[in-house]
Image (cartoon, coloured by chain):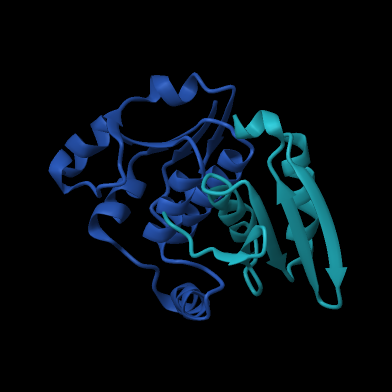
Amino acid sequence: MKLKLEKNGDRYLLDCRDLTCPFPLTMTKIALKEVDSLEVITNNPPSARDIPEILRRQGYEVEVVKERNIWRILIDKDSKLKA
Amino acid sequence: MKGIIVHSGEWDRIYHAFNIASVYASFDEEVVVFLTYWAVDTIVSDTQMDGRKGEILSSAIQKGILKRLEDVIKMAKSVGNVKVSVCVTTLNMLGIDEKELPNWVDEVGGLAEVLSAETVIFI
């Protein structure tokens, strides 16, 4: 399955607004097969909580920025995962 | 490895089995989904749910809350290592030829592989 990812500066953008579990997580994982730096936008609170936790456990660097009704999840593969 | 045995032919149970598979795959777990009995009948005959449940599910698909079953299965397989196995005994019982199976089925197999998983879910 190929996702539509927009380039947004140094990152690719995955807009998951209005998608609920498990799609923001599963689409994020599919996107990370293609790109090393990703920004995921979600307005689904469980996804905003779970995606960072799961990815950090897997060795990704993750930052979460809350903006009004959405979360921007900034994800980077570290050097080990890029290999 | 995680194993999911899907015996039920109810659309929503099969759908949710693949949601579970996709989340396990997101954890980088290997997953085997073993379709048996009425689950095989449903996927080959493309049976949808009827009545009130069917109306609710169709509406949720139209609104984008749920996806089509085939799309959820393909998504689960795209996330990671999700293998779909179909019960050989069921094929014989239902008189289904292997060629009639959807192209997202990986193999015709038996219970031993899925039961060797460290966790097995029966649906």
Image quarter hosting the N terminus of chain B:
top right
Residue B42 to residue B113: above or below: below
Judge by depth and name the residue closer to the eye, B76 or B33: B76
Q: Chain B appears in which tint?
A: blue
Look at 59% across and 40% down and name the residue there.
Answer: B24
Judge by depth and name the residue closer to the eye, A56 or A38: A38
Tell me: A56 left or right of B89. Answer: right
Look at 62% across and 34% down and name the residue there.
Answer: A82
Residue A27 to residue B121: above or below: below
Q: How many marks?
A: 0
Residue B3 to residue A13: above or below: above
Judge by depth and name the residue closer to the eye, B10 or B58: B58
Locate residue B49: give its quadrant: bottom left
In the orientation shown, which residue stands out farthest toward the front?
A9
Judge by depth and name the residue closer to the eye, B80 or B12: B80
Residue A71 to residue B80: above or below: below
Tell me: B40 left or right of A9. Answer: left
Residue A50 spot, x, y in % from top left: 76, 51
Tell me: B66 left or right of A72. Answer: left
Residue A14 spot, x, y in % from top left: 61, 64
Residue A9 spot, x, y in % from top left: 67, 64
Residue B89 spot, x, y in % from top left: 25, 31
Q: Chain A appears in which tint?
A: cyan
Look at 22% across and 46% down and name the residue there.
Answer: B101
